Image (cartoon, grey):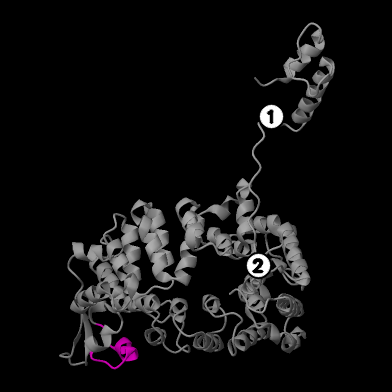
Amino acid sequence: MTTTWNDLVTTALLGTERRAVPVGVREPGQEPAGALLDAAAVRTVQRRAALLPVAARARPEPAPEDGRPPLPAAARLRLERLLADRAGAGGGGRRGGAAPDLTELLPQWLAAANGHGFRAPEALLPALLEAARARSDLRPEALALGGPRALWLARLNPQWKYALRGDAAGGAALAASGVVAGAEGRHVWEEGLFAERVAVLAALRRRDPAAGRELLGSTWGKERAEDRLMFLDVLREQLSPADEPFLEQALSDRSRNVRSAAAELLTTLPGSALAARMAARARACVALDRTTDGGPRIVVEAPPECDGGMERDGVVAKPPSGRGERSWWLSQLVEAAPLEIWCERLGVGGAAEAVALPVADGWQADLHAAWCRAAVRQGNAEWSRALLGPAAHPPAPQGSSWLDPARLLSALPAGERAAWVAEFIAVHGLSEAFRLLGVCAVPWAEPLGAAVVDALDSARDAGGYPWSFSGVMGLAERCLNPAQADRLSVLTTAPGGPAVASDYWTEAFQRLIGTLRLRATMQRELAEGAPEKTAR
């Protein structure tokens, strides 16, 4: 029975000769009065700390080893400063002044450190986990740098439970430990947290895709629907025709979301049986009519119903609010069909000719929107290029509200993507370019970097204010090539226009240049102590 404070007080008032001390003696020969005073002292400390006595818990197992090299001294100090600045800023960026915003450089620093294969210093793991708790965008890179010790530490603090959840962030720490194969990897797969299981499966798929698929198949029937859905997403990496039988079986899954995910993966395999079935259905709905006086045009006959076979292959029968059933079914069929079928079906030589054909009866928006989604899903640069059109065209042509240039750009090679966005900015300016800049490779290649700087300079000359372009300016600080810092010094000179606006622009460009130079310094600090063979 637990001794209360009242028990101790009563014994003290009555005396140890009239009432037995309600606690045991601490050492042989100790007087009852001494034992009572010792117990009162312990309970006093507990009362002042507002704690109740509890049984001592077992000590945690020692943290696992992390064999990756430590950070160089300069890079370690840099990380300490970045984390301290994040805490001082309350988790938010500081846009005022000409000094670089260190909170926005932390994600890039973490990615660079992981690229060199370093591990986080043990003393900074709490601050690193706390930073990732406050900013979800930091979690994958922060936990990868923290490695298995970050995951071990997260188990001891409920505030860091995000690291144990079943997402990419939760698995990053385990992936760094290299536990993917053999008995240890199998044990983690069968007994580990979901985040650990995802990490093991992903790492095994990269090393041996067939072994990863077999590991997933060994427990597939016992997994929860939401877990099966996330495991399927892991198969996306290293996806090949060898995965088709497994995915075909998943088309009969009891979960609609799992069936849809399996169907989407199969449509990215042009030679799959599902792609062939979708192609046959799409051909039956879209044809070329050469009998009209105005020349050839595409005619569309949307499916009259959504049968069981279509639903099994991933077609969702119920459309979203405000969307007609037949157009909804048609869009899904065309989106899932291999794009290669359309040149033959429409009698054209390439994607550009197919896109240029008129479409009868108002079906153009639905058909082209489905082609856009198919081009992105299948990573088809030719069709993405044709649907995008020249960058000099208006950013939102009438009747083309379905067009999403940012997604189509993702299917183009990095160099072509940068060149298209640079031309777009040169013609249309920065107001419509923010999302387009977000899909370009970092650091920005030329002439994209020059186009962004020229557009900012033009905005300054036009008498605008820098906060109207704060989003683009923030991207420039993170994405411009640091080697351009010295070339940008001319931008800090005061141009014509309102004096107040000029002062704000000068400050903004000074911050841009300072940030670029700091990024160059951080890269040197990491590179100087990097191992000869990088981890990523």
Mark 2, residue position: 68
In the image, what residue occupies the spot 56% across and 62% down? 172
Which-is-in-front pick, marks 1 and 2? Answer: 2
How far from the left and from the top, in percent, is residue 26? 79, 24
Q: Which kind of residue does numbered mark 1 sit on?
A: Leu
* Quarter of the rendering occupied by the N terminus: top right
Task: Name the one closer to the observer, 225 or 410.
Answer: 225
Q: Could one spot residue 496 in this view of the protein?
A: no
SS class of the residue under badge 1?
loop
Q: Position of residue 413 (x, y in %)?
A: 48, 85
**Residue under the image location 70 percent in, 86 percent down:** 483
Residue 343 is situated, as x and y percent measured from the top left of the image, at 27, 88
Q: CA distance from mark 1 to mark 2?
A: 42 Å
Q: Looking at the rendering, which quadrant does residue 495 occupy?
A: bottom right
Q: Which residues are magenta?
A: 347-359
Q: Is residue 267 above or below residue 347?
A: above
Q: Which residue is mark 1?
A: 52
Q: Quadrant of residue 102?
A: bottom right
